[in-house]
């Protein structure tokens, strides 16, 4: 396949991915559940504190809910608190959180700001993952 044709196909693939990204975000609504409260904060704990434990951002990990109604945060070894849910995806999307982490550093780490920005980043991270073509959808070559 000539190089010009490959470039054209690559451009089409990028446009389709961008279109999927825009469509996924068009409603600006977060489709989340309680299991996402703690996992959406994990990239911030990794970037700011270098840990998967939620102790330092506990109010944000609770999603602003009272402690007695939060079941998705459990004690871990050593008395620290951790998410009950898998952490692979939050670890993988952590680089996407870097610009927001720097923005929070400049303005302060208050709980409400972290909750709002973690909700935004959850939506954007999910849309990046959803808009990325799978291996079977990629153009060969």
Image (spheres, rainbow, N blue to C red):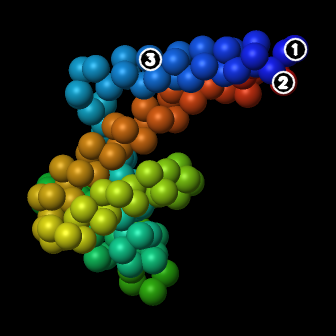
Q: Residue at x 38, y 78 (%)?
A: 49
| Residue that mark 2 sits on | 141
Classify mark 3: helix, strand or loop. Answer: helix
Q: CA distance from mark 2 to mark 3?
A: 23 Å
- Residue 76 seen by the camera: no
| Residue that mark 1 sits on | 1
- Residue 40 seen by the camera: yes
Taking depth in this image into account, of 16 and 23 the one nearest to the observer is 16
Q: Pointers 3 and 1 in contact (CB under 8 A)?
A: no
Residue 109, given in percent of the width and then of the height, sits at 18, 70
* Marked residue nearer the N-terminal end (2 or 3): 3
Label 3 neighbour load within 10 Å: few <14, some 14-19, many 20+: few
Q: Is residue 60 left or right of residue 20?
A: left
Q: CA distance from mark 2 to mark 1?
A: 8 Å
* Vertical arrangement, residue 32 with respect to residue 18, above or below: below
Q: Residue furthest front?
A: 4
Label 2 neighbour load within 10 Å: few <14, some 14-19, many 20+: few
Q: Quadrant of the C terminus?
A: top right
Discs 3/1, front: 1
Residue 98, given in percent of the width and then of the height, sits at 40, 60
Q: Residue at x 37, y 22 (%)?
A: 22
Classify mark 1: helix, strand or loop. Answer: loop
Q: Quadrant of the N terminus?
A: top right
| Residue that mark 3 sits on | 19
Q: Pointers 2 and 1 in contact (CB under 8 A)?
A: yes
* Vertical arrangement, residue 90 with respect to residue 136, above or below: below
């Amino acid at each position: 396949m000539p190089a010009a044709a490959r470039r054209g196909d690559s451009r089409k693939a990028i446009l389709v991915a961008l279109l999927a990204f825009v469509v996924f975000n068009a409603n600006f609504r977060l489709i989340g559940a309680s299991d996402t409260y703690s996992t959406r904060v994990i990239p911030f704990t990794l970037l700011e504190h270098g840990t998967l434990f939620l102790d330092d951002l506990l109010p944000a990990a609770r999603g602003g809910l009272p402690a007695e109604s939060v079941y998705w945060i459990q004690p871990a070894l050593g008395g620290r608190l951790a998410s009950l849910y898998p952490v692979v995806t939050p670890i993988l999307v952590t680089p996407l959180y870097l610009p927001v982490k720097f923005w929070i550093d400049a303005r302060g780490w208050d709980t409400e700001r972290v909750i709002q920005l973690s909700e935004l980043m959850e939506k954007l991270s999910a849309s990046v993952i959803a808009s990325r073509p799978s291996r079977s959808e990629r153009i060969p070559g």
